[in-house]
Amino acid sequence: MIGAKNSNENLLPRRAIVLGAGVVGVATAYSLARRGVQVTIIDRADIAGNGASFANGAQLSYIYTDALASNSLLKQLPMLVLGRDSAFRLRPSLDPSQIAWLMRFIRNCTRQRYLENSLEGLQLGLESQLAMRALLENHTIEFGHQSPGKMLVYDDAAAFKAACEMVSVRQSHGATQEILTPQEAVNKEAALAERAGSFVGAVYSPQEELGDPHKFCNALLSQLVTAYGVQVRMATDVQSWKADKDMTVVLTKAGEAIACDHLVICAGMDAATLLKKQGFGSSLMPMKGYSFTAAPGPASPKMSITDISRKTVFCPLNGAIRVAGIAELGARSTKIDPRQLASLVSTASGVLPHAADYAGSYQSWAGIRPMTANALPIIRKVAPRVTINIGHGMLGWTYAMGSAERAARLMGEV
Ligand SMILES: Cc1cc2nc3c(=O)[nH]c(=O)nc-3n(C[C@H](O)[C@H](O)[C@H](O)COP(=O)(O)OP(=O)(O)OC[C@H]3O[C@@H](n4cnc5c(N)ncnc54)[C@H](O)[C@@H]3O)c2cc1C
């Protein structure tokens, strides 16, 4: 596990640049600034959290960290390539880096690797939960944070049986989860009443939390500026970087050279380009997804609900309902395809017809999940003065705080 060696805060750099002001970058800036490092955070956007962290599913899914690569997904791959699943597609490409990623992904589809990757995710999720708690004990940050728990709803008996086996594995690793009958699930979450009879069982995780990632990025960033003197340079597009044993220099597209003692790259999907020379060109695969945020309906859930078969998540957020879903592996553009968005709205209204005001106006969004083949982030030193914290895939909001702590500990390692 990263962070297991001796970590010595005296070895931390004096001045660091954090490249990227998404959830991972802002959390990383916090973990360094609170250890006394002078941090400058750089992003090409005008506002923090405008990339993949903008309007994601809002789940702080500390317990449900199951890896994407699994034996059951492997069996569905031909169907996904043919586009037979409206929620999950694989866009085949002859791009050698995508082929290399897919080969690694397939190697992660064994039962053993799925278990290892999911449990490593659980460990990071639990670390993130602790780090988030510690942050909120020290700072007041308004981001619609709640801890209502989460319900995973199954309508396929075989998938539910496999999920029940994972519950005991997770319980033996410190997680609290309950297996519920449909009636027990309805008793806990009344919004499921309109689905009663159409699902075989549910898994309830009382430890799961939620919050608005975009608000989090901006609220934490303003605390970083006022409480820790962090410098913020938005609208600064980074072209490349170079590092030697004495310093690292970041080169912007506008021709500026910005020096620091250590660079931490938290650039989401774009990290693959910035790290091509270091051999990370094929480490990340884009996986596009959609969300819409609507007014709540008459049977709006009070906790997060994930419909496992339809890969759709419902989340009560800031007095509204956010619905997220769709996975297009290999799709890079963040442009909203109206057909895909309509398909998400239609799926959601079929699953929970009265959870949201589907007929009213809503805010829609598409973003790119930076996926690694094993669904775990890459937190590593790639040069003596450069660390990367990238590849958080489907769970970047969940993993941000724990990954940030791991990155800061790694930077202080002997
Ligand atoms: C539809 C959808 C639903 C999701 N739901 C959830 C969920 O419910 N829970 C969860 O935990 N995760 C969820 N995720 C995943 C999560 O949103 C991502 O993993 C996370 O936002 C990644 O954060 P990041 O900081 O690494 O990347 P980003 O938020 O993309 O931030 C990277 C930043 O780096 C900047 N940048 C990149 N390159 C440069 C450069 N060269 N120069 C300057 N700046 C640069 C970008 O402008 C950007 O601001 C979801 C994702 C999607 C798409």
Image (cartoon, rainbow, N blue to C red):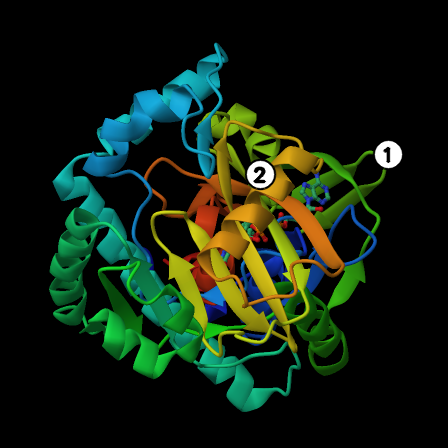
Q: Residues within 10 Å of mark 1 (few under 14, many from 20)?
A: few
Left or right relative to 110: residue 47: right
Left or right relative to 13: residue 371: left
Work out whether residue 107 can be spotted. Answer: yes
Q: Nearer the viewer, residue 308 or 213?
A: 308
Please give the residue where the numbered disc 2 appears in the rendered image: 269
Compared to residue 21, the image places residue 344 above or below, namely above
Please give the residue where the numbered disc 1 appears in the rendered image: 255
Q: Which SS class for mark 2? A: helix
Q: Position of residue 269 (x, y in %)?
A: 58, 38
Q: Nearer the viewer, residue 131 or 98?
A: 98
Mark found first going from the N terminus, 2 or 1: 1
Quarter of the image holding residue 362? bottom right
- The amino acid type, in three-letter code, at marker 2 is Met
Marks 2 and 1, how far apart at CA: 23 Å
Queried on whether the Cβ of the residue with tag 2 lies below 8 angstroms from ligand 1, the answer reads yes
Q: Is the N terminus in the top left, top right, bottom left or bottom right quadrant?
A: bottom left
The residue located at (14%, 41%) in the rendering is 111
Compared to residue 150, the image places residue 292 above or below, namely above
- The amino acid type, in three-letter code, at marker 1 is Gly
Q: Residues within 10 Å of mark 2 (few under 14, many from 20)?
A: many
Tally of marks: 2
